[in-house]
Image: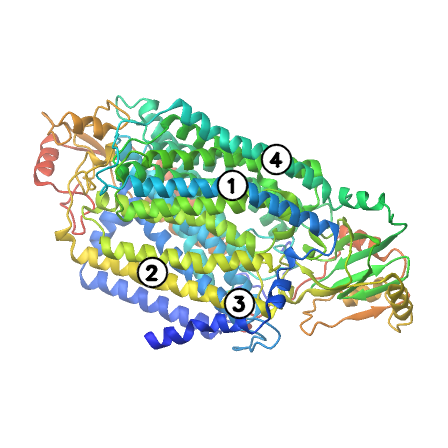
Amino acid sequence: MITSLQGPWSPSLGRLSLSAIPHNPIITGAFFFAAIFAVLVVGYVTYSGKWGYLWREWLTTVDHKKIGVMYILVGLIMLFRGFVDALMMRTQQMLADGPHSSGFLGAAHGYLVPYHFDQVYSAHGTIMILFAATPILVGIMNVVVPLQIGARDMAFPYLNALGLWLTSVGAGLIMFSLFLGDFSHAGWVGLTPLTELAYSPGVGTDYWMWAIQIASVGTTLGAANLIATIVKMRAPGMTWGRVPIFTWTALSTNIIALTSFPVLGVSLGLLGLDRYFGTHFFTAGMGGNLMLYANLFWIWGHPEVYFVILPAFGMMSEIIPTFSEKALFGYITMVAASFAIAGLSWSVWLHHFFTMGAGPDVNTFFSIATMVVGIPTGVKVFNWAFTVYRGRSRFETPMMWAVGALFMLLLGGLTGMMLAMPPVNYSVHNSVFVVAHFHTMLMVVVYGILGGISYWFPKVFGFKLNEALGKRFFWYFTAGTIMVFIPMYTSGFMGMTRRLDYIANPHLLPFEVAEELGILLYSVSIYYFVRQLYVSLRDRNESRVGADAWGTARTLEWLTPSPVPFYNFAVTPHVNARDELVWRRERGLDESVPVRYEDIPMPKNTSVPLVIGALAFALGFGLVWRIWWLTDMSFLGIIVVVIARSFVRNTDYVVKASEVERIERSGGGAISLEPSPSRP
Amino acid sequence: MRLWVRRAIPIPLLLLAGCSSNEISRQFVLFRPAGPLSGADLHFTVLDVGVMLGIIIPTAIVTAFFLLRYRKTNAKAVYDPKWSHSNRIELVVWAIPLLTVGMLGYYSYKGTFEVNPYNPRMIKTVSTGADAVSHTLNVDVITTDWQWLFIYPKQHIATANELVIPAGTVVDFRLTSATVVNDFFIPNLAGMIDVMPGMRTKQILIADKLGQYRGYSANFSGGGFSWMGFNTKVVTESQFHQWVQKVGQSPHHMNYAKFNVFAKPTKNMDGKTDHFSGVSAGLFDRVIKAVMMGKVYPTPLPAYGKM
């Protein structure tokens, strides 16, 4: 051992021992919930004999649509976990209010002891940003981008699957930390030097660090893949001026990801050196500099914020024209604004710590740079408004979410402009006002995501989601958002700071009660979401759709049948206009059948990404508990598998033209919920 | 179900009614400045919100109007599916945010210098005014896990978890942490400034109004963070001198060895305060130097079972 650890360590099990299993009724309850859920899933798959189907069609797939769906599924599960964390936090803050509040389960106030509460909020932040928003967005881009540009798959299908499994490993490690050991208590940002071994002696910080580290490798690979796909695989005729707006935002956002995620990798790597080898990069003493970490983290962290919001803007820019039955206003401006936001995202990181004590010149520079971001963002809002102008707005569920996102953006913009100004920022920087602000902005992302999911769901699955329940979901969700975040903004003006396990000021109680009611409204909205999925699935035969599910869609993905066949387009389309589908519809070409089918080369399924994922999980687990034989073997295993795979030449197969014709005639899709005809 | 809802809804309202309206407004500490720095913070907040609302409210109204006016069911509205570009509108939609940012950027520049914690322009203005401030009170602040130590170096006294300052005097704080990052925040008096281990930050402020104000750490620092508050008493000059005399007679002393005991992880859940006399000179610098040389006050490994 290079660093001195508190607690026992053994060569065979590392820091792992029976005492690592937490004895807390809440965690035990969560464990039983998870165990019952797992047993039910495994039981159902075994009972219905679907292991083979699951293995062939999902676990070893390289199909970008299925990978996208799995990304979204992982993201939604983590979104639920993050929501439960939020529910716990809100309840704790409501119960632990004022010196006379009572305590339960061993806590002085409320029902969570500080160390447990700190883990809950750290997990909430880490999960929501990195394991809910990010995977869902990557998933949507995975599904939609190749379809929008008329490609058959991503540029690197195998890499795509690898990205999915590495992201899932990160999510898995976080879930594991719930039942074995603990999680970081130092916030999702990993406040240094609190994350150093002296102040976080347990394994929690290591779980946090390695989960993010492994998942971010996946995200980086995914970004390289999407950029290559967009640059190299557009259908003939799709010049840059004809690229759909969502694809543009996907390009800008993945440039951000590709350039910023390595910074995160380096900063966490240096923190890892501190924790494992006793170096002093981010310690307070011995030449370390803890603010260096804050700088490095936010040099990734702020671009990451725009990484999640740009695709949401892209989805809004697709949904609003479709449901306004009119072309997007200011296409070129929209593209320029997206890239302006992406570029500016690199020049604003210091506004996350204006209170560090940098001189007024430095703070002024970053303040104005931050405000400048408001210019392209403001332009986008105006352009959406002018898209609606002289259109024919239809308020179906996706449009409701898009409009909701637009109004959230206005509120978030107002409070963002406040925070951008240091004299204002100094008084609310670490308060719940900031928390309410960035949640408002993340609500833009969530509204965009929920709009995007309901918009493209029929494309992927071939049937629409239930409208009535979708609207109910929207309204309860919106009511929850208002009830939680308006009181939160208000309590910020009352000086309430973030991350409080116990609230000293009893006058904040009414606001905490209101927020609790808000989160209960969110719970109701989740019920309607699940019910919407269930009812839509049950009644799917009544809501089947054709190629253009909404009747007024504008882009290429709506040209191919819903659900999309595994090869996407029977014949690669030639693109003639920016709004290709509108162009074809006007000429009566939108439902034409190809004259002649051709052989289609497709990538073969492979289990290698799954194997690498399993090894990466073992590596992460070994690193967390410092089980060196396990880390050595799994790391070696990854290297061997990667090298072995590079010798495999036979990675593609050909779908014969006759087979394509047969599938097209029968209208068979890829993501049908029943096993599709077997393929080589 | 209905009955339950009807019973639950008035609860927050009852709680609100329980306090007088004056009591409620006093809780909005950011709107109740007791010194020029927090006054400036509030001034720029109002300015910023005013300018932004001037943009955002019309935008929201116009957007909502467009959505309603051009709804599909309104047959009277014009429908122009091809219209997607207008140079004039483009110019306006870029100009509006550009001008707004220009204006707010200027205010931001001005405000940042006015409340610069190291050398606020606000305070210079005050000290060259009619009632010029003749002297400065120095206070050295050290945070530990999870307490505050306020050292008055010239008076050779120190207090724990309690701050007393005279009104109308420039108070020059030097801040450092023995362990992890905290944030020094007295909402009624001044904005936040980070308190970092191995480093020294500053906050210069004046309190105008006598009274008691809550101060606390704003940056999360571990298990005892929620209890890391301190009372700030703003007293008259003569009251302050009396208080210094009184603290000077305290039987408790403070030097580096005693500080190391004081700095052991402590959750101050009962809001305990303490007074120290005979504080050894240069304690603040010694703590910074020791931390720079690698001194840590480790947190004990939490038992997983007792989470």
Residue placed farthest to the front in the image?
B76
SS state under label 3: helix
Q: Chain of mark 3?
A: A
Where A235 falls versus A493 (above or below)? above
Residue A93 is marked as 3
Q: Are marks 4 and 2 in contact (CB under 8 Å)?
A: no
**Residue type beneath disc 3:** Gln
Which of these two is toward me, A19 or B205?
B205
Residue A526 is marked as 2
Which of these two is toward me, B212 or B191?
B212
Q: Nearer the viewer, mark 3 or mark 4?
A: 4
| Co-location on one chain, circles 1 and 4 | yes
Relative side of B193 to B136, left or right: left
Quickly name the residue at label 4. Answer: B105
Identify which residue is drawn at 77% across, 51% down: B205
Which of these two is toward me, A300 or B159?
B159
| Co-location on one chain, circles 1 and 2 | no
Quickly name the residue at label 1. Answer: B54
Locate the C terminus of chain B and report the quarter of the image it occupies.
bottom right
**What whole-number distance in Å separates the C-alpha atoms at marks 3 and 1?**
35 Å
Image quadrant assignment for residue A221? top left
**Residue type beneath disc 1:** Gly
